[in-house]
Amino acid sequence: MKSAKWRVKIAAIIIILVSAFLTFLSALLIRTYTFDPAGQPASSSPGGAGSGLAANFSLEERTLLLSHLKGALRIPTVTRSPSDWNTLALEEFGDLLPRVFPTVFSSNLVKHEVIANYSHLFTVRGSNDSLQPYMLIAHLDVVPALAEDWEVPPFSAEERNGYLYGRGAMDDKSSVMGILQGLEFLLKRGYKPCRTFYIGIGHDEEVGGNSGARNIATVLQSRGVKLSFLLDEGSAILSGIIPGLDKQAAIIATSEKGYVTISLSVSMATGHSSMPAKESSIGILAAAVSKLENNPMPRMLGQGPERGLLEHLSPQLRFPLNVVMANLWLFAPLVSRMMENKPSTNSLVRTTTAVTEFHAGVKANVIAPFARATVNFRLHPVHTMEELLHQVQSIISDERVKIEVLQHHPSLPLSSYNDNSFGYQVIKGTIRDVFPAVAIAPGLCIAGTDTRHYLNLTRELYRFTPMMVKQEDLSRIHGVNERLSVKNYEEIVKFYFRLMQYSDFWKLPFPHSALGDL
């Protein structure tokens, strides 16, 4: 009798547990397949708004735009530090622009100004002063390139197998030339904008932008300019990088990571190498650096704008990743562990640690009196410098290692936008026009850009270039064999050509059906 009662109780418990599991599973699936991260009803019409001039470039124009980019890539506009620029190359680049974009420089609609000797500000006057202007920015400087590491000379602009090789092909001369080429083609077709807009080309972004972009922003602010939105480089169209996504993904970065650069140093008594102490400055510092590399900063997935990226893409992902990404409230720890296995996605999960310099020693038979390392941290948007330094001290846990902050730029705040914001709609609509098959989502820029200098001009700050980036391309940015496909550069020009028109077509409020949502 007792045995029968126990069997009944066990059966009841099992039924309750199974029912609870099925209810929980149903809730997950219902949320997954009804989940709308934008909080808006999905549109059945992905078409663009307005018509305007189609980006149908002739063979002659396609040849010209490629030739112009090659000319830009051949000029070694290298910046090494805030006080070390290739000024001759910067001047040469300034001379190139009016030669290749004669209509831009001769149009009575365009005012060109040289800022801080080497940067450029273009004002393109619109016919309707009641419309708030916008701004497109890029930078013409590049990081150094060691010729011996490249398959082709880094400033040769050599074309191979449909790709154009050269330092700056991806970062960021394709944006500079693409914006101005798009404007050149529009003006040659007789286009007259309704909305005034600005184009800012900085010359020292790679070393902070404190001479170029900062002064451009100061000039505009002194004139009382307020922008509806600003678009800079800093994100791209990802192909084959996001697991579970069968299509390309255009990521519009709405925030960017800050950074902290610190110096670690150790001083010890020197002497002859035949009588070494138990520990050396090099050994102590090497141990400290090793601790930092082996103890990454804590995972912060879901606490910043990266959450929006994953949730916006969740409807496009294959099962079961769509369930996981739509329910980050439950699966964030699991997703963090998955993402941290690849450098490209680990950068979204946490503040990253990169040891970038190590200096020590004076001679083979002399004990090094001093050792110094430089470490660069890219701050997750919710991670502060004060928290970081406390964690660094705790990890190293050695008073002999001196810690000094060399540079600090806090993360930029999330753009004041939603899916109906003017700038976001313009950018998203233009992407859909030129790249109709891609998924689109907001995201986080993991590097620093010139955007930070324009915070007083607008709260709608976006970072996106329609550059196709595959997994194997990630190491080319600031690396060797930087390249861009010829086809993709034509698409970049088309993107800016259409964006300048879309900014005129649309006026708030926009019908949702004009754009389409994920």
Image (cartoon, rainbow, N blue to C red):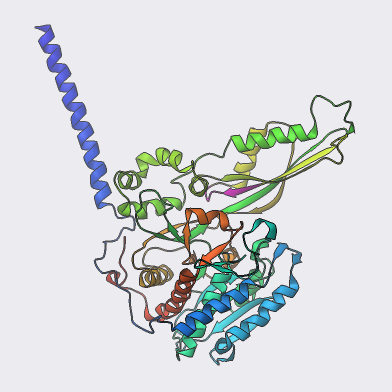
Q: As rendered, which of 304 and 279 lies closer to the eye?
A: 279
Circle count:
0
Horizontally, residue 206 falls left or right of residue 302, namely: right
Note whether residue 166 is visible.
yes
Q: Quadrant of the C terminus?
A: bottom left
Q: Residue at x 55, y 64 (%)?
A: 483
- Give the residue drawn at x 68%, y 66%: 210
Residue 173 in percent (x, y) is at: 58, 70
x and y, in percent, of residue 290 in the image: 65, 35
Q: Eyeballing the image, is 352 above or below 212?
A: above
Quarter holding the N terminus?
A: top left
> In this image, 112 relative to 234: left or right?
right
Magenta region, residue range: 376-382
Q: Quadrant of residue 45?
A: bottom left
- Among the 4 quarters of the image, the one containing residue 50: bottom left
Instruction: Please give the name of the residue rendered at 71% of the width and 73% of the height, measured from the top-left corner.
Output: 89
Q: Residue furthest front?
A: 161
Q: Residue at 27% x, 48% y: name it.
A: 32
As drawn, 159 above or below 125: above
In the image, is 43 to the left or to the right of 420? left
* Quarter occupied by residue 57: bottom left
Rendering coords of residue 322 (x, y %): 31, 48
Does the rendering let one see residue 226? no
Q: Does the magenta portion include 374?
A: no
Q: What residue occupies the far top of the structure in this picture?
A: 1
Query: Which residue extends farthest right?
Result: 272
